Image (tube, rainbow, N blue to C red):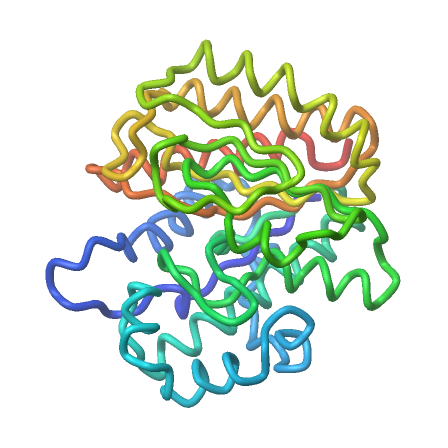
Amino acid sequence: MLHLWSSSKYAIELPDGHRFPMSKYQLLREGVLAEGLVPPERLHDPQRVRVDDLLLVHTREYVDHITNGTLPAAEQRRIGLPWSESFVERAYRVVQGTCEAAESALTHGVAMNLAGGTHHAFPDRGEGFCTFNDVAVAIRRLQRDGRVRRVAIIDLDVHQGNGTHACFAGDSQVYTFSMHGAKNFPFHKVPGTLDVELDDGTGDAAYLALLEAHLPTVLREARPDLVVYLAGADPHEGDKLGRLRLTVEGLHRRDAVVVQLCREIGVPVCATMSGGYGRDVRDTVQVHLNTVRVLQSFAGR
């Protein structure tokens, strides 16, 4: 049984010309419901995450600055989104959505937050449209509550998850695997457990060959109780920031490879959206819809 998390609070108003595609959240929600991928009662609206949960990962000073709108201007610009009350509400709810999706995955095998994957957020700062690190908070909350011990992060956003790597640096119980553009943001990479760097222009065949070569090793070495999968849409050939050349069909196959291999060995999967900045936002939404379709096909197995 697949459960999803989504909220109207995930999207906020931005200045004219801002490059972040806020419309993708509502379009994805509408697509999920129109196709009947889950009934409305299994599309959940998260509330705000508790501050105590954020403090499992983030510093008190940083959480207070975000909450109160006192972050220095340069640090707010690094995040790339302007501060407002709705910015704070969005940040808190996105984290709670991933926390609840991760809990659901442990019960039902698969789940997804239709947002999140904010992997450029560090314990004491944010960047690259990422405020709080929802994946890190969800994992630490499950570990605190005794629900999991070992976790594997499979980060297939086109950008390296530098913040997530920093959050779990030196932690042998959290395996961080990232496949990302070698020359793309962030330009200073933070080493994870396993990083696979991709040349600009990498297409379906080469990408999938690398994924299929590395993923069994990741799962064997990680021995995870849970996989958190960052199913970024930005490797798509039409993405403004991606610089790779994967097709919608290739990304659909990517999702199937990840979820099938995890479920074959009995590991639950919690997915998040992560990045997607298509020249046509409908391409981004289609990639994410395919992720939901793959998860639905494995629900109950």
59 is higher (above) or lower (below) than 190: below
What is the quadrant of residue 223 in the picture?
A: top right
- Which of the two residues, 193 or 268, is positioned nearer the viewer here? 193
How far across and how far down the image is residue 245, in percent?
A: 32, 21
Image vertical order of residue 99 relative to residue 296, above or below: below
Choose top left, top right, bottom left or bottom right for residue 236.
Answer: top left
Q: Residue at x 81, y 61 (%)?
A: 143
Expressed as whole percent of the image width and height from the top left, the position of residue 169 reads 67, 53
Q: In this view of the protein, can residue 288 be seen by the observer?
A: no
Residue 86 position, x and y percent, is 35, 78
Name the outermost residue toward the left.
16
> What residue do we see at 27% from left, 79% from top?
73
Q: Is residue 2 left or right of residue 163?
A: right
Q: Is residue 148 visible?
A: yes
- Left or right of 259? Residue 33 is left
Closer to us: 178 or 89: 178
- Looking at the picture, tell me which residue is in the foreground, 109 or 157: 157
Q: How many marks?
A: 0
Judge whether 191 appears above or below 290 on screen. below
Where, quadrant-wise, is the C terminus in this rendering?
top right
Residue closest to the far right:
146
| Observer-nearest of 210 and 196 | 196
Q: Quadrant of the N terminus?
A: top right
Residue under the point 73% across and 52% down = 170
Q: Residue at x 51, y 35 (%)?
A: 156
Residue 141, image x and y in percent?
Answer: 74, 66
Locate residue 256 relative to residue 172 in the image: left or right.
left
